[in-house]
Image (cartoon, rainbow, N blue to C red):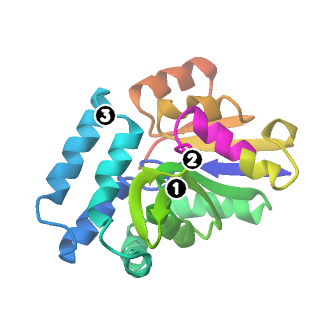
Amino acid sequence: MKLALFDLDHTLIPFDSGMAWTRFLVARGVLPADAETVYLGYCQQYVDGTLDIHELHRASVAPLASFGMAALRQWAAEFEAQMAPQVPEPMRALVRRHQDAGHLCAIVTATTRFIAEPFGRVFGVADVLATRSLVIGDTLDGGIDGDPCFGVHKLMHVNQWLATRGTRLEALEQSWFYSDSASDLPLLCAVSDPVAVAPDERLRARAIEAGWPILERS
C-alpha cells in the first residue's frame, strides 16, 4: 500500500481555513463584525506561544455554542460551495495524481473537523483526520474531543487511523506527507517521502538540510 497525506492550511489551500470560516459566518450575520479581528488576535497569541491549541480551539468554537449541529452542518455545506472556487487547481491536480496512482489519501490537519471536512469533499478526499470538537447533547462544548490533531499527535492520529485498516505507517511500501509547517516535523520525519510546501523558515531550513523536495507556490 502507498499513502499520501496532506496538511490543509497553507498547504493544500493558500490561506487559513479558520479565518475563512470566520469571515463566512460574519458575512451571514452569525458572528459579530469584529470576529475576524478577535480571531486574528487569538492566532497571534498562539504563534507567540501565549495561547495553546486547546485555548485557541475554545476561543474559536465558543461563539457557536448556542447553535445546534443542524445549523452547523447547513453552514458547512454553504461554506463548501463558497470555498470550492478558491482551491488552487495545482493542488487539486496533486491530489488527483496520487488518487489516480491508486494511493490511499487523507487530509491531516489541526483544523477543527467541521471546518476541514468541507475541504475534504472539495478535494474528493474521504478521509479527513482533524481536531474533533467536543459535542454535548446537540451543541459544541468548546473543548477538544481527545487529543488535537497537531504536532506529534498528528502522527498518533495517522497511526490510529491506519490501525483500523490493519496496517501501520512503517509497514507501508511508500508514504508522502505534504506540509508547510515545522510543527509537522514528527509526521514529516515518519514518512518515506516528506515534501515541504511553501514552507515556513524553520521547515525550509530542515528541508534543505535533509534534501527534501520543496514545492513553491506559483
Q: Which amino acid does label 2 sit on?
A: Gly
Range of magenta residues = 146-159
Disc 2 or 1, which lies upstream in sequence? 1
The secondary structure type at the circle numbered 2 is loop
Q: Which residue lies furthest to the left in this view?
A: 33
Q: Can you say whether 125 is above or below 198 in the image?
A: below
Note whether residue 88 is visible: no
Q: Which residue is drawn at 39% across and 75% down?
A: 72
Q: Residue at x 78, y 50 (%)?
A: 162
Across and down, in percent, residue 73 comes to: 44, 77
In the rendered structure, find residue 132 and report the number of the disc placed on it. 1
Disc 1 residue crowd, few under 14, some 14–19, many 20+, Cα 10 Å:
some
Left or right: 183 as drawn, with respect to 36: right
Task: Out of 97 and 20, give the one closest to the viewer.
Answer: 20
Which mark is in front, 2 or 1? 2
State the image quarter where residue 23 is shown. bottom left
Left or right: 184 as drawn, with respect to 32: right
Q: Which residue, given by chain and number where applicable, does mark 2 sit on?
A: 146
Q: Do labels 2 and 1 touch, CB within 8 Å?
A: yes
Q: What residue type is labelled 3?
A: Leu
Q: Which residue, given by chain and number where applicable, does mark 3 sit on?
A: 51
Q: Can you say whether 179 is above or below 80 in the image?
A: above
Q: Residue at x 37, y 74 (%)?
A: 79
Q: Can you say whether 75 is above or below 175 in the image?
A: below
Kindly report the distance in space between the C-alpha atoms of the residues bearing marks 3 and 1: 19 Å
Disc 2 residue crowd, few under 14, some 14–19, many 20+, Cα 10 Å:
few
In the rendered structure, find residue 87 and report the number of the disc placed on it. none
